[in-house]
Amino acid sequence: MRKFSPPIKRLASSIAALVLLSGPLASAQSPAPADAIRLEQQGRLAEAEKAWRSVVAASPNDAAAFASLGVVLSKQEKYPEAAGAYRKALALDPTLPGIPLNLGLAEFKRGQFARAIAPLRAALKQDPSSLQARTLLGMSYYGAKRFSEAVDSLEPLVQSDAENGELRRILAQSCLETKKYSCAEEQFRRILEHDPDSADAHILTGEALDGLGRTDEAIAEFEQARKLAPKEPEIHFGLGYLYWKSRKYDDAATAFEQELSISPNHAQSLAYLGDIELKRNNLEDAASFLEKSIQQRNDLRIAFLDLGEVRGHKKQYPDAIKAYERAVELDPSQPDAHYRLGRIYMAMGQAERAKLEFAKTSELHEKNDAAAVLKLNKPQPAPQ
């Protein structure tokens, strides 16, 4: 399914305007710092940078001078160099006010989200009321794919600023990534209240509803997204997958074919069309779709599993074994490929190898059943 990517850098730009990129003035009272300050105030940033570099060269232990150099570099969008200057300043004086926030912002602006987290935490420790630091920290968690922490950080911000649609999108996507489907559904519903023509929001509302087991409602959301953006890649595939999951294979096939009309080499659509043709017992058509799919991608398990089935029906046993072994590589926890391998070995008269595969099938079934029972018996939190 398509994954929504909120405009995190655009939102960072709007936040950057709120962050006052300023630092302590150099402590030295020589003419050089005064010149650097004057040049910066006049907007002559390249000259100010040169002046501050002269200051830090002459006073390598002046933390404030390094901080001021970082500010000038940031204003010129030289974020890697700015981050280096801020880190040097903090190494010399960790108590400098505002510099952890500036460092976090510089790392964020250059896309180093994981590196931004520590200084932004330090900034919040310096000033727990800083909205900028808290917002940047939540978005940095998101950018670093630490979605659970992103949810914890962003939920209070969205509750206090309900009109911030872009921040709500990031929260919604984080909820979806952590399989907190009720949270995701609520956030996307709120987004749709403000922008009912957002195809992305309909798609992701559908994903959340599907995660909650409400697949028919998910299909309705994808249908709406398709009406709004019929040429958008991935929408038809997502809809087709939901129909396929609901065993509405004719509707699924139509959607997958529409996806292929937009993206002729869409590997997943080819794989699922192959699966549908296999279910219809159309082996030649199934083989054609499945072989095209694995030419595009070699990591779609359903394609290899079904291709093994097709080759087995055709008594192409060595090729069937290769396909099933690849399916096992892609997900060793699933028993179905081992069972099918066992059947192939039986057909080839290799009873011992078949016995091993059937034993592995039973072992994995028992393990999966035990895991399911453990999950069911796990204590649930009390309702809030």
Image (cartoon, grey):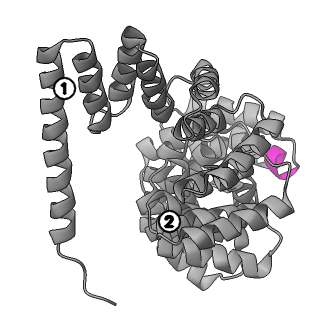
Which quadrant would residue 261 be assigned to in this image?
Answer: top right
Name which residue type carries label 1.
Answer: Glu
Disc 2 residue crowd, few under 14, some 14–19, many 20+, Cα 10 Å: many
Q: Residue at x 53, y 65 (%)?
A: 210
In this rendering, would 20 be left or right of 123? right
Q: Is residue 38 above or below residue 335?
A: below
Question: In the rendered image, is residue 4 in sight?
Answer: no
Q: According to the image, label 1 marks what residue?
A: 357
Give the residue drawn at x 65%, y 81%: 161
- In this rendering, the answer to whether 50 lies above or below 13 is above
Residue bearing the label numbered 2: 175
Give the camera-side residue of 251 and 111: 251
Q: Which residues are magenta?
A: 38-42
Q: In what element is the residue under mark 1?
A: helix
Secondary structure state at the residue bearing disc 2: helix
Which residue is painted at 59% across and 84% down in the image? 160
**Above or below — where is 65 with respect to 242?**
above
Badge 1 local density, few (<14 within 10 Å), some, or many (20+)? Answer: many
**Direction from residue 124 to residue 249 in the image, left or right:** right
Q: How many marks?
A: 2
Residue 323 visible, this orientation: yes
Query: Magenta span: helix, strand or loop, mainly?
Result: helix
Query: Where residue 247 sits: x, y (%)?
Result: 54, 56
Residue at x 48% of width, y 24% of height = 310
